[in-house]
Image: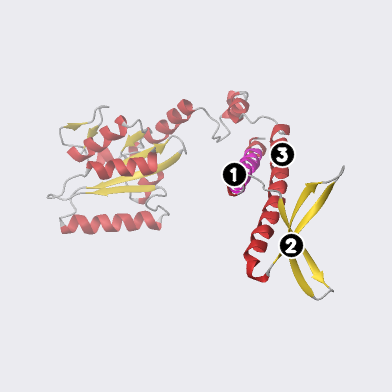
Amino acid sequence: MIKEVELLKSFIDAINQEIDNIKGEIESLERRYPKDDGYFLEIKKNRGKYTQFYKCKMIPGQGRFKVERTFIKRDDIDVARRLAQKDFDFQLLKILNEQLIALNGTIQEFPKLDGMMLYNELSDARKALIDSKYIDDQTYIECWLAQYNEQDAADSFQNKYPIETSYYTDNGEHVRSKSEKIIADKFAKEGIPYVYEPACELNRKGLHPDFVLLNQETRQTYFYEHFGMMDKPEYAIAAVKKIAKYRELGYEYGKNLLYSFETGVDGLNINDLYRIILENCK
């Protein structure tokens, strides 16, 4: 049922997008012809041989309309072109308005989509079996945080490499560097759900991300690495190998992986950090 609802939403989204496209085209045509002067083009064959163009207009006569024709000379062919284009555009405008009416009618006939309400009506047992984007944000975030906070004692990075610094984030996490504290505090300030040194499947592949982040709007998860000593050759080589390992496992920058760099001379760039957050997590 959830899949059917998602397909319905995709269909309705596509209709709404087409409605917006049609409205844009109608507005463009209406701007081109703010006022109809009533003239149209008539094309005739003179003795079946020569094509002749006439600028025409319907004018009132005695109880009925008659056509007033003005011959368009060869030198004035641009007049014929403008009239031909206008006639075509007016027919197009008529069709577009008919399409708009039909699509709006289609939208009105479809049942209102409320996936969150549908999900919330399920039993707890059924909810537990479904991975649904219609879970309310707070519940989703709580489940997401729990997933990455479940440390595996047999593979605990912090147990193998205990943290020996004096840096604590505003949320109370003990971190390995001043830069990691700045980064974590920035995530918290921007309202981005995160976990420091998360428990994840990557741990079993020899990778231990500094952070995992959640874009609440798209519900996209990103792993985040900060490489803090890039002016040290051995560290830089290890960092490059680590990024290559991520890529080997299907993690690409901007898709599901983010990272930043600094050296002893060039420290953490807060503007770059904010840009990374803004472009991927907000």
Question: For numbered disc 2, what is the local secondary structure?
Answer: strand
Given the image, on which type of amino acid does mark 1 rest?
Glu
The question of residue 69 being in magenta is answered with no
Rendered image quadrant of residue 41: bottom right
Q: Residue at x 31, y 43 (%)?
A: 275
Residue most toward the front? Answer: 62
Ranked by sequence position, the earlier of labels 3 and 1 is: 1
Given the image, on which type of amino acid does mark 2 rest?
Tyr
Residue most toward the right? Answer: 63
Question: Bounds of the magenta span?
Answer: 7-29
Given the image, on which type of amino acid does mark 3 rest?
Ile
Which disc, if any, is residue 54?
A: 2
Question: For numbered disc 3, what is the local secondary structure?
Answer: helix
Residue that carries the numbered disc 3 in the rendered image: 101
Q: Which quadrant does the C terminus fall into?
A: top left
Q: Residues within 10 Å of mark 3 (few under 14, many from 20)?
A: few
Q: Residues within 10 Å of mark 1 (few under 14, many from 20)?
A: few
Which disc, if any, is residue 27?
A: 1
* Viewer-closest of 50 and 210: 50
Ranked by sequence position, the earlier of labels 1 and 2 is: 1
Q: Residues within 10 Å of mark 2 (few under 14, many from 20)?
A: many
The question of residue 20 being in magenta is answered with yes
Which disc, if any, is residue 243?
A: none
- Magenta residues: mostly which secondary structure? helix
Residue 249 position within the rendered picture, expressed as x and y whole percent measured from the top left? 41, 54
Q: CA distance from mark 3 to mark 2?
A: 34 Å
Rendered image quadrant of residue 73: bottom right
Ranked by sequence position, the earlier of labels 3 and 2 is: 2
Question: For numbered disc 1, what is the local secondary structure?
Answer: helix
